[in-house]
Image (cartoon, rainbow, N blue to C red):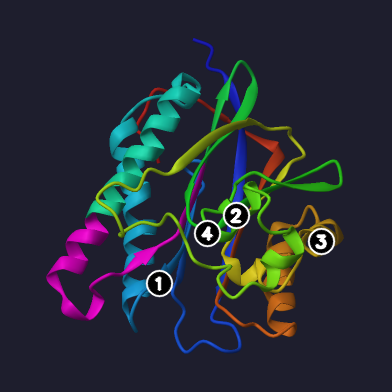
Amino acid sequence: MNHPLIQQWTGVGLSDIGRVRKLNQDAFSVANDLQLWVLADGMGGHAGGEVASQIAVDTIPQEFQRLLGTTPRTSRSTEVLETTIVQAIETANQRIREQASQRADIKGMGTTIVALAVTQTHQTSQAVIAHAGDSRAYVLRNGSIALWTRDHTLMEERLALNLITTEQVRTHPLRHVLTKALGIDPKAHPTVQTYCLEPTDILLLCSDGLTKMLTDAEIQTLLLKDAPNLDRMATTLVATANRLGGEDNTTVVVIGSDSDATVVDLASPIG
């Protein structure tokens, strides 16, 4: 019996407390076996943000695997993957709210989220990205970077209405006021989008600790300098954010396709 060969994508993650904060409230999950990568930037109280982000990056891969069960990767349509990733995020939202309701010291905690899953249909890899908040997903393709998410922030809403300029957003005192996050409302309602991937794409998930310190153009330059070495790209991004002041926790997950790695898609349990 012939089984289809599918492209394998691999991610590496790195998180650093930075030069100012006393606690790292970022968290990430690299589940290469699931072809799923998750990044969260927590907020609320001394320990609350750290708790919320960890719940998110623990819950989403668990629910993702539970919901997909033994479905072979080539049988995962993008529609199924979109539904699955949103359900997993909504479960994480519920668990964060449940924990917050049981402890006064973490009441009101929340976290941003950005999650990326890859599937393959008709020999083409596709990325499903779901997010809530201002943690971002970028793609580096043919030497140029593009932002694949749109921040859920008050300033982004004003920008869309042409009430403020891009330059003003970077320094506005309310630029980090979120309009969506996990743990805040009974339903998270993440934004979910699907993109076609090219074999040479480099994908980047990051917390705003990176984008506070670096412009998109600067991120592009650093990625190009170290591509395709994923570990080196992650290290350089975090180190540069710290060198420029490290005003926040900085977390990155860098994902690339291993052109020499293919796996046989058997109808067996994921992972």
Q: Is residue 4 visible?
A: yes
Residue 169, how many percent across, how many down? Answer: 67, 65
Outermost left residue: 102
Q: Which residue is mark 1?
A: 43
Give the CA distance from mark 4 to mark 2.
6 Å
Q: Which residue is mark 3?
A: 226
Q: Who comes first in sequence, dot 4 or dot 3? A: 4
Instruction: Indicate the amino acid at tag 2.
Output: Arg
Give the CA distance from mark 2 to mark 1.
23 Å
Residue 127, how many percent across, how many down? Answer: 58, 35
Q: Judging from the image, what secondary structure is the residue with disc 1 in?
A: strand
Give the CA distance from mark 1 to mark 3.
31 Å
Residue 11, how many percent across, how many down? Answer: 59, 52
For the point 73% across and 63% down, the residue is 233
Above or below, 53 against 142 in this view is: below
Instruction: Indicate the amino acid at tag 3.
Output: Asp
